Image (cartoon, helix red, strand yellow):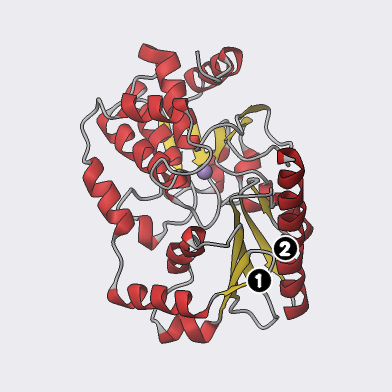
Amino acid sequence: MDYIASELVEELYKLVDSSDKIIIHRHVRPDPDAIGSQLGLKKLIQNKYPQKTVLAAGSTTKGLAWLGEMDKVSEDDYQDALVIIVDTANQPRIDGKHYNKGKSLVKIDHHPDVDDFGDLQLIYPQASSVSEIITLISVYLSDRLPMTNAAARLLYAGIVADTGRFKYDATSLYTFRAASFLKEFEFDAFEINDRFELMTLDQAKFHAYVYQHLTITDDQVAYLIITRENLSEFNISEEQTDSVINLASTLEGVLSWVTFVEGDGANTRYRGRLRSKGPAINEIASRHDGGGHPKASGANAYSEAELVEIIAEMGEANRVYLQEKQEEQA
Ligand SMILES: [Mn+2]
């Protein structure tokens, strides 16, 4: 048996079964797991209940439109609607405004539980992705919410992306079980992987720039600051910088890494993406207007001084981590 708590899934099933209208939200700046779990769940419900109205809320992201498009959702749609939020730990990160105007609110997530919202909460921090959770829910509910080819494609994409192709720490036996279950359905897994790898020549040149300009501190933190000027020079969007955040992960002598992207507003702001293969970094992120997973978080620096602070705090976390590891071995 997997980690899906059956009472919670039964409650979710009852809510879905008894609602004529269901609106699904996910986080802003969506990644493939956000879109995959949102649209995957939508397809599953639509397949089982063709008469129900199922809407995906939020703005369409150009780079991920190949996975699927969002629906037009207005405030009136929320009347008597069941609202489900996927892959979003805290309410400010929800894409779409009226999510709390439905008859009930459900949260399905794999981030650490930092913001207590929703009448029903299915939170599994041990899951690699919400796409994995939705897959296991379908497995558990069986004929009550059966898998389809279209949903399998979306959920597979979410799992592949959130695990870095089954590579990250959160990849568990349940991840492989979910993926193997999805592979029984008809969709082009090669196409999905290929899409994730594909980049423009400008992006490839930008990768080269990243390697040439990142700094590794004595405390094993790799960092890089990407300016607005860099973005226009390499003709890349802020969204496309996602492809460089893990470049430092394979470098020797790097335990944690952070990429800052300069904001385009009038005030100084750098959006930082923090990653680690050593100490947890989500507490550092939450001290700097962010949060996330222990090994992958987002934060904001509102001055160059704060940016330096974040790098220093990551260095300190690395020192403590290495010290503790040494004592364990002694
Ligand atoms: Mn996710």
Give percent across and percent down for residue 77. 51, 41
Q: Where, by quadrant of the figure, is residue 107 drawn?
A: top right
Q: Where, by quadrant of the figure, is residue 266 drawn?
A: bottom right
Three-letter amino acid code of the residue under disc 1: Thr
Pick the residue in front: 52 or 210. 210
Residue 297 vs residue 161: left or right?
Answer: right
Pick the residue in front: 49 or 169. 169
Residue 242 vs residue 181: left or right?
Answer: right
**Quadrant where the C terminus lies?**
top right
* Classed neighbour count for the residue bearing mark 1: other residues with Cα under 10 Å, few (<14), some (14–19), many (≥20): some
Give percent across and percent down for residue 246. 49, 60
N-term-proximal mark, 1 vs 2: 1
**Is residue 274 something that shows in the picture?**
no
Q: Secondary structure at mark 1?
A: loop
Would you name the residue on which mark 1 appears? 217
Would you name the residue on which mark 2 appears? 315
Q: Are marks 1 and 2 in contact (CB under 8 Å)?
A: yes
Q: Residue at x 66, y 71 (%)?
A: 217
Residue 67 vs residue 253: left or right?
Answer: left
Q: Which mark is residue 164?
A: none
Cα gap from disc 1 to disc 2, whole angstroms: 8 Å
Three-letter amino acid code of the residue under disc 2: Gly
